[in-house]
């Protein structure tokens, strides 16, 4: 994610807004969980969901709402967090309480090895429909999300002329005007490519290749390319595009009529969590309206129907959303990487 914009005043203001004057838990079971968590005093969170500043703010907001329970934030990329966790496990070290990855495959593997705790957070029932049942077995839950949709440079393309669905990018008028990332480097792009293959077959990309798209690596490379004016339309990320637009850059989103592709990032409590009650309380917070509001301010997606996005984005109730299953992603992304290289030669 591009985090170059000055965010400290915005996030500090959000922190002040979300801190309740007298923290109170709504239900008796929460009160009991909170008391048990206070006795443990802290938890350790391995996370790849946000930048470090937002992760630290998340921890502070939680402690403000639940005084006496501190969050030790260990923020890295998803693969680094996973490798660190596996090293802990190999050495019989119980360090991580809550694990938050951007790759659901990590959670699936941990679940298969019986390394995750099965929990039923009360707040999970209030998630928006696209986030229900991400893990039917109840070992991990979605706590962060983003979209891949159509993005464009508003100085080069009028809104009425922008592509309205994914096949529109195949129109010859967009020759040498399309930007994408690469599925071999970006999980977002891999999931998008898999969704397009599911909808339209690999012929979609054989046709796209004729338009000579510019292919970067990260899905966020499309934002840079659109900003420079080098290309005018893209299969791009909602969050980074809107953050860049917030800085005054000429970028905007189109929610495709055939579906924006949803990327779900889960969190889980470790089976050997040294602070299991604090971990469960923190999971309730990650699934709450307070955390959803923080996500919206950070230009990630809101997982709660009662927390609406900021200007420029739509609530899920107003857009068609495509969500692939974890099993589809695990099986399909290696396949589309090979097909992509055969088609585009890189």
Image (cartoon, grey):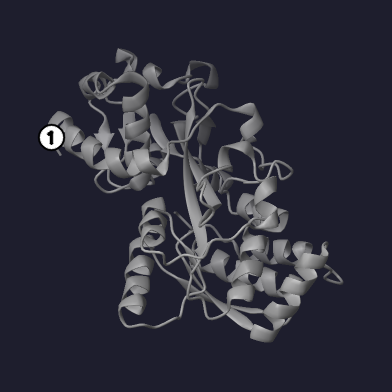
Q: How many marks?
A: 1
Q: Position of residue 260 (x, y in %)?
A: 49, 31
Up-down relation of residue 116 to residue 223 (above or below): below
Q: Residue furthest top?
A: 172
Q: Residue at x 71, y 58 (%)?
A: 290
Callout 1: 10 Å neighbours few (<14), some, many (20+)? few
Q: Residue at x 84, y 68 (%)?
A: 24
Up-down relation of residue 183 to residue 11 (above or below): above
Can you say which quadrant of the picture contains the C terminus? top left
Up-down relation of residue 314 to residue 50 (above or below): above
Up-down relation of residue 219 to residue 151 (above or below): below
Can you say which quadrant of the picture contains the N terminus? bottom left
In this rendering, position of residue 232 left or right of residue 308: left
Question: Within the image, what quadrant is residue 198 found in?
Answer: top left
Depth check: give the residue in front, 324 or 81: 324
Q: Which residue is mark 1?
A: 345
Can you see residue 230?
no
Q: Residue at x 33, y 71 (%)?
A: 86
Q: Position of residue 181 (x, y in %)?
A: 31, 40
Q: Position of residue 231 (x, y in %)?
A: 34, 32
Depth check: give the residue in front, 177 or 218: 218
Question: Within the image, what quadrant is residue 101 found in?
Answer: bottom left
In this rendering, position of residue 319 left or right of residue 170: right
For label 1, the SS is: loop
Can you see residue 142?
yes
In this rendering, position of residue 150 left or right of residue 320: left
Q: Residue at x 45, y 80 (%)?
A: 95
Q: Position of residue 200 (x, y in %)?
A: 33, 19
């Amino acid at each position: 994610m591009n985090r170059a914009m000055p965010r400290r005043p915005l996030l500090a203001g959000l922190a002040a807004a979300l801190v309740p004057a007298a923290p109170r838990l709504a239900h008796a079971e929460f009160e009991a969980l909170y008391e048990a968590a206070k006795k443990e005093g802290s938890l350790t969170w391995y996370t790849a969901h946000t930048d470090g500043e937002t992760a630290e703010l998340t921890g502070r907001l939680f402690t403000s709402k639940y005084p006496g329970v501190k969050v030790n934030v260990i923020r890295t990329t998803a693969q680094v967090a996973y490798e660190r966790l596996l090293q802990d496990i190999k050495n019989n070290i119980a360090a991580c309480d809550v694990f938050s990855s951007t790759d659901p495959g990590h959670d699936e593997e941990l679940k298969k090895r019986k390394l995750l705790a099965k929990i039923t957070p009360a707040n999970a029932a209030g998630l928006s429909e696209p986030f229900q049942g991400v893990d039917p077995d109840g070992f991990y839950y979605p706590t962060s999300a983003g979209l891949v949709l159509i993005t464009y440079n508003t100085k080069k393309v009028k809104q009425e002329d922008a592509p309205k669905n994914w096949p529109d990018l195949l129109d010859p008028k967009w020759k040498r005007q399309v930007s994408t990332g690469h599925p071999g480097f970006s999980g977002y792009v891999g999931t998008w490519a898999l969704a397009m293959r599911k909808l339209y077959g690999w012929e979609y990309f054989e046709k796209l290749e004729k338009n000579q798209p510019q292919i970067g690596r990260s899905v966020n490379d499309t934002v840079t390319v659109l900003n420079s004016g080098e290309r005018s339309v893209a299969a791009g990320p909602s969050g980074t595009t809107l953050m860049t637009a917030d800085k005054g850059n000429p970028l905007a989103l189109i929610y495709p009529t055939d579906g924006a592709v949803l990327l779900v990032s889960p969190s889980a409590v470790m089976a050997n969590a040294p602070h299991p009650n604090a971990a469960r309380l923190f999971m309730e917070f990650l699934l709450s309206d307070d955390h959803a509001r923080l996500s919206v301010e950070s230009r990630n997606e809101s997982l709660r129907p009662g927390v609406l996005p900021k200007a420029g984005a739509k609530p899920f109730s107003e857009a068609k959303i495509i969500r692939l299953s974890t099993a589809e992603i695990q099986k399909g992304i290696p396949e589309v990487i090979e097909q992509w290289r055969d088609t585009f030669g890189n």
